Amino acid sequence: MTRFRSTWSRCWRRRCHPVRCPVVLDGEIIVAGPSGLDFDALQQRIHPAESRVRTLAERTPSRFVAFDVIALEGEDLRKEPLNRRRVRLETLLASARPPIHLTPYTRSAAVAAEWFNQFEGAGLDGVIAKSWDSPYVPGKRLWAKIKHQRTADCVVLGWRWDKYGKTLGSLLLGLYDDGGNLHYVGHTSSFDAATRKELLKKLEPLRQEPTAEEMGRRPGGLSRWSRGRDSMDWQGIRPELVCEVAYEKLQSGERFRHAARFLRWRVDKKPGDCGFDQVESPAAFDLDSIFAVRG
């Protein structure tokens, strides 16, 4: 983010209702779409061309969600317990209006469980649990993030080379749509060096460049960073292998938001049976209503 700090700062000065006192907040920048949080749109906001950044700032405006207050009016609050910092934060942002939001909190396990299930429909991938008496310690995670975990059986459609181009970097995963088209949905790379060598031996005999008729969305392709160059740093194979992976979320119904975790090979599963129909879709939930919640 710091690479584009000046552009972000100019954008925020135009859009925000400033808090009129010296303050340091901990929080997150988000972009909201029709279905809730839009991580893809947020990534597009980080662009090397300033003119493009300005256009996107108008087209997909961002918001700031405050989690914590670290310093206020010259007072360092990091050693204060969370319960006191939360009171200060709520007082500070009592009159805040969009695009500034205060994240909701609760001390009820039952309410947290309800939020965990409901808020996924607005694009959230879980809840954060913090100690009520903990100080703010920079650089350390004195909290736990509870995420949704699901599994899917995916076709291995190829592999990506490592950054040196000498060995396997990750397995590329695909799912079939209702029309029988195989689409790239993400990758898994949680392998040690010995396993990567064994995987290459397993995959090398299956080398095959997929045709346009055989594939829908492909790995690589043009991006806002490639400046016209196709990022074809992957090797396709015949779609014969199936593996089970753990994933957190299928972003925009198209690909895994984060790298999936390899669980096992599914020699009992036919590649054609690996479709999008196995992916769960949570019930939609209004994002703006989350910021009106009080625990």
Image (spheres, rainbow, N blue to C red):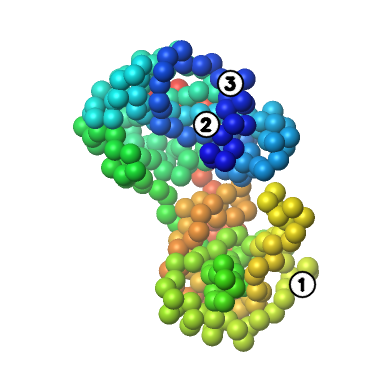
Q: Nearer the viewer, residue 7 or 201?
A: 7
The answer to whether residue 104 is visible is no
Q: Nearer the viewer, residue 181 or 170?
A: 170
Q: Earlier in the sequence, mark 3 or mark 2?
A: 3
Q: Which residue is mark 2?
A: 287
Residue 155, x across and y down, in percent: 58, 70
Distance from the alpha carbon under mark 3 to that under mark 2: 24 Å
Tell me if I can see residue 7 in this picture.
yes
Q: Residue at x 69, y 66 (%)?
A: 232
- Tell me which residue sits at (62%, 35%) in the image: 33
Please determine whether, in this image, residue 242 is positioned above or below residue 295. below
| Residue occupying the point 30% across, 20% down | 75
* Image location of residue 70, percent across then percent down: 34, 28
Residue type for callout 2: Leu
Above or below for 41 versus 260: above
Rounded to the nearest angstrom, the CA distance separating label 1 from label 2 is: 40 Å
Vertical comparison of 56 with 211: above or below: above
Report, in whole angstroms, how far the alpha carbon at label 3 lies from the one at label 1.
49 Å
Determine which residue is flagged by label 3.
Answer: 13
Residue 211: numbered disc? 1
Q: Mark 1 packing: few (<14 Cα in 10 Å), some, or many (20+)?
A: few
> Residue 28 placed where, x, y %?
47, 34
Question: Of the residues under marks 3 and 1, which one precedes in the sequence?
Answer: 3
